[in-house]
Image (cartoon, rainbow, N blue to C red):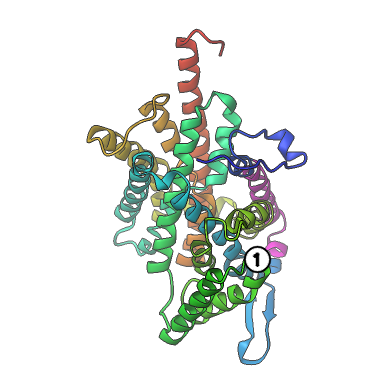
Amino acid sequence: MPDHRHIRIPVLGRAAPPIGSEFVSLEAASGIVLLLAAIVALVWANVDTTGYTSWWSHELTIGSGDLAITESLVHWVNDALMTIFFFVVGLEIKRELVTGELRERSRAALPAVAALGGMVVPALIYVAVNVGAGGTKGWAIPMATDIAFAVGVLAILGARVPSSLKIFLLTLAIVDDIGAIVVIALFYSKGVEPLWLGAGVLVMLAVITMSRLNVDHPSAYLLPGALLWFCFYQGGIEPTLAGVALGLITPALPRRGVPVLERLELGLHPVSSFVIIPLFALANAGVILTGDAISEAVASRVTIGIVAGLVVGKFVGILGASALAVRFRIGRLPDDISLRHIAGVATLGGIGFTVSLFITDLAFRGTQFSDAKIGVLAASALAAIVGMTGLSAVLRRERSAAGEPT
């Protein structure tokens, strides 16, 4: 991954020192904030259940007349604010495709194949558990990896983690994001309205034209971005995908000496990581953990499928695909890591928090919704603990074999 200027984060920057580029530093620090937000949501939901539910159920209307949109606060977070998160994801994907790891086939092949295995196997396991039980609509929930939490775990392990392993995880997560975006677009959008889809295409063409005319100030794209979101929303397309679309058509190379993509990413990545994602966690991670709720979740095939998919499926899929890619020379392991390292990262891939919860909101309502959220939280916690323990043991064994202090 190319070097970038480091963004200094007061307090957090000292508590969670950088372990690579500023992208990694931001993700490591945001993982801590995300964890705190999730804990607050859980405590709030279980101490003041009525207050938590009532607050996020408040309705907010934006616009007037036929153009007015009325949604609950939780859906404004999920459908509107998360568009910025997906815009940043789109920018990251564009950067990696043009100037980063995904530009070079030889370096991208292994993590790309690993990511594919880490999406297919969890989905198959989930479907196998839920076939005939009415919960198959959540098949994509265990496909996702939360990059902030996964990188946060690597940050805890510190400088012992080889830099090539960090790059492997980041590249895998970017490919994983691409897969999640495609799945959301194809399988979790509502019935598409052709007229609104056509209007959205026209807006995107207008944005591309503005870019070609060297319109490089971000504020010039606020109105087209809002229009694209509105077209997607009205057209039955998951509206957050408007952010991805805008990110992907942002020029990755400087225009008239102005690094548009880099400037947008540097400005929005901290907002996404430290404001939007924690708000998303606060609005969505508040699961009621009563004895009855836990008992129902433990017996639910939805919960079992998610836990099995994230904890077992991600491990088997990522490690198995990596081993096959190396065996058949599709990809090559960097010199300083082995399949034992990949096994640790494969387990961390089971931390599916943010996008898994996002897909849960698209897939379920009622009891299955609660069961799915409990499954995501339980699986993510288990994957983090097992992955950190296993990878730490591998690193400690290697340092001991090399005669270095552990």
Considering depth in this image, is 284 or 198 the residue closer to the camera?
198
Which part of the image, by quadrant, shows the C terminus?
top right
Instruction: Work out whether residue 348 can be spotted.
Output: no
Residue 276: horizontal and vertical position, in percent? 65, 58
Considering depth in this image, is 112 or 133 the residue closer to the camera?
112
- Say whether residue 51 is magenta: yes
* In this picture, residue 17 sits left or right of residue 355: right
**Label 1 crowd bin: few (<14), some (14–19), many (20+), radius 10 Å:** few
> Residue shown at 52%/34% (left/top)?
385
Relative to 296, residue 316 above or below: above
Write down the region rendered in magenta: 29-52
Q: In the orientation shown, which residue stands out farthest toward the front? A: 256
Relative to 301, residue 23 above or below: above
- Say whether residue 217 is magenta: no
Report helix, strand or loop for mark 1. Answer: helix
Residue 120: horizontal and vertical position, in percent? 32, 51
Residue tagged by mark 1?
218
Instruction: Work out whether residue 189 can be spotted.
Output: yes
Mark 1: amino acid: Pro
> Residue shown at 50%/14% (left/top)?
399
* In this picture, residue 358 sits left or right of residue 33: left
> Residue shown at 72%/38% (left/top)?
13
Main SS, magenta residues: helix
* In this picture, residue 399 sits left or right of residue 159: left
Quadrant for residue 57, please give it.
bottom right
Q: In the orientation shown, which residue stands out farthest toward the bottom? A: 65
* In this picture, residue 334 sits left or right of residue 228: left
Residue 80: horizontal and vertical position, in percent? 61, 69
Q: In the orientation shown, which residue stands out farthest toward the right? A: 10
Considering depth in this image, is 214 or 331 the residue closer to the camera?
214
